[in-house]
Amino acid sequence: MISYRIAEKDLTAATFGVSALSETTLSLRAIWRPEVYPHMSTWRRAIEPRLARLDLELLLGLVAPDYSTPEFLNPRPVSASTDFDEELRTVAALPLRVVDRDLDDLYPSGRPSALVGPTARVLDRIVRVLEEYWRLCVRPWWSPLHANLAGDITMRAVTSARVGLRPMLTGLSPALTFDAKEIHAWNPSGPAFVADARGRGLVFVPTHFTPHASYPFNAETPPYILYPAIGRGRLALPSPAPERAVRLLGATRATLLANLREPMSSTTLAARRQISVSAANQQLRWLRDVGLVTSIRDGRSLLYFRTSAAEAILGDLDSPT
């Protein structure tokens, strides 16, 4: 457990944010121990074939036995939206002493072999492998993942306006407790420290990859607390289209087709893909005209589903593309 000493003004000035790099790094927990994150099972199954292309020894080495990850890969966010590439460029330019310190903190008894070697070379390898992991396994699903995190932040703002700041903060997680002078965050396997957060800015960060609460590895890091995002169990992750289908149909049509895993209305499909209903209808009509989808009437809705020709084009969605 960690405790942050705070004043009332620190709570009223607290902000919420999302870091694409931090969420990507934390997602490695679900690669290592998928049973702890059952709400991410759809995503985990979808990326399974892609993992074979990655340096898993290094990626899994970034998650310590207590689920901690390197501090320099978990930047404290300043807004509800960040750019992964920009965050990774910042990491690539870090002083090597910072990288060494954080990796040694993570593995005080000795690093795994994938993280051993000249620091500049280790950092370059981490940056390259993380960029590839993001490109293959996170970016194709980032839109709904980020939408859920941003939606959580919006919900917290609405709740705070309705019931007050402290009740809203108390509702973030049972792992968070408050008293007049401190905020306590509990995790059964995380680090433990007491730090003065007064005047340092406190940030709350929703994530899909902590069942309790997560926090910095050491007291000197600018204070932030990660908590379980609302709606994790209801997260509807779209299926990415195989590259062969994208080449044949174009990205938009191929992605719509890939997401018709069950009969679905254009309204539902549009919401899942975050496009307008009219755009979804236009593409579905084209797909129907060429024999890749068909439709049936269900009350007032028209439900679309894939034909055998579409299944042949898509093949096994879980196969490497």
Image: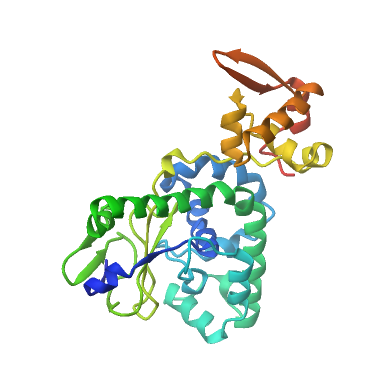
What residue lies at 62% left-to-right and 70% top-to-bottom? 86
- Residue 116 shows up from this direction: yes
Q: Eyeballing the image, is 122 above or below 132?
A: below
What residue lies at 44% left-to-right and 63% top-to-bottom? 17
What is the count of numbered marks?
A: 0
**Residue 244, image x, y percentages:** 80, 40
**Residue 58, image x, y percentages:** 59, 65
Q: How is the image coloured?
A: rainbow
What residue lies at 67% left-to-right and 56% top-to-bottom? 135
Q: Eyeballing the image, is 96 above or below 189?
A: below
Q: Eyeballing the image, is 220 above or below 303?
A: below
Give the farthest residue toward the left.
Answer: 180
Closer-to-camera residue (80/21): 80
> Relative to residue 229, is residue 32 drawn left or right?
right
Choose top left, top right, bottom left or bottom right for residue 14: bottom left
Closer-to-camera residue (182/8): 8
- Residue 107 shows up from this direction: no
What residue lies at 24% left-to-right and 51% top-to-bottom? 163
Question: Quadrant of the image for the N terminus?
Answer: bottom left
Choose top left, top right, bottom left or bottom right for residue 319: top right
**Residue 169, image x, y percentages:** 28, 58
> Relative to residue 228, is residue 31 drawn left or right?
right
Q: Eyeballing the image, is 320 above or below 146?
A: above
**Residue 181, image x, y percentages:** 18, 72
Question: Quadrant of the image for the C terminus?
Answer: top right
